Image (cartoon, helix red, strand yellow):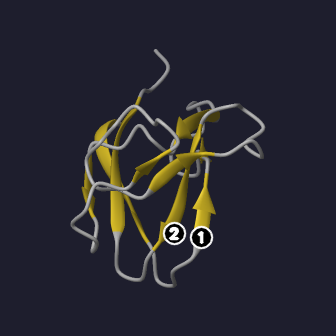
Amino acid sequence: KGSHTLRLQFIHGGIYLCSLDVRLVATVIPSMSTDETRIEAQDYQDFYDRTPLVNDWGGCYRGDGVDKSILTTDPTGGECFVSGRTNEWLEYEIFVKVEQ
């Protein structure tokens, strides 16, 4: 329970990332419910990007150097990352709650 950091590190480059589905599976505390959360790829809190230029193709809302673009193939209509390169990473803050 509590606040955690989820780091997604790209081992190989050339991926397309739209969202992550995170599911909590209770194995230690049986009374804890399972819960699924969708994290949109562009909602990261921290990152490491090997290309220093701002690569914000297609009018995405963050101009911080992470390679991203709006892709019509994203089923949620959101942003997707284009060209996650080897050893780049994104971090997301997640909060796990416990049922009372």
Q: Which percent across, then down, holds residue 90?
A: 35, 58
Q: Is residue 54 left or right of residue 56?
A: left
Q: Which percent across, then down, holds residue 8?
A: 42, 63
Quarter where residue 52 is shown: bottom left
Establish if 33 lies above or below 41: above
Camera-near label (2 vs 1) is 2
Who's the residue at 57% across and 76% down the image?
A: 14
The residue lying toward the viewer, choosing from 56 and 93, is: 56
Q: Is residue 78 left or right of residue 100?
A: right
The residue lying toward the viewer, choosing from 81 and 57, is: 57
Establish if 58 lies above or below 10: above
Who's the residue at 25% across and 47% down the image?
A: 64
Residue contact between numbered discs 2 and 1, judged by CB atoms under 8 Å = yes
Q: Quadrant of the N terminus?
A: top left
Establish if 18 lies above or below 59: below
Please rate how many residues cluster around mark 2, counting C-alpha atoms within 10 Å: few if below 14, some from 14 to 19, many from 20.
Answer: some
Who's the residue at 58% across and 33% down the image?
A: 37
Residue tagged 2: 83
If you read the primary sequence from the N terminus, does the residue marked by circle 2 or circle 1 appear first? 1
Residue tagged 1: 15
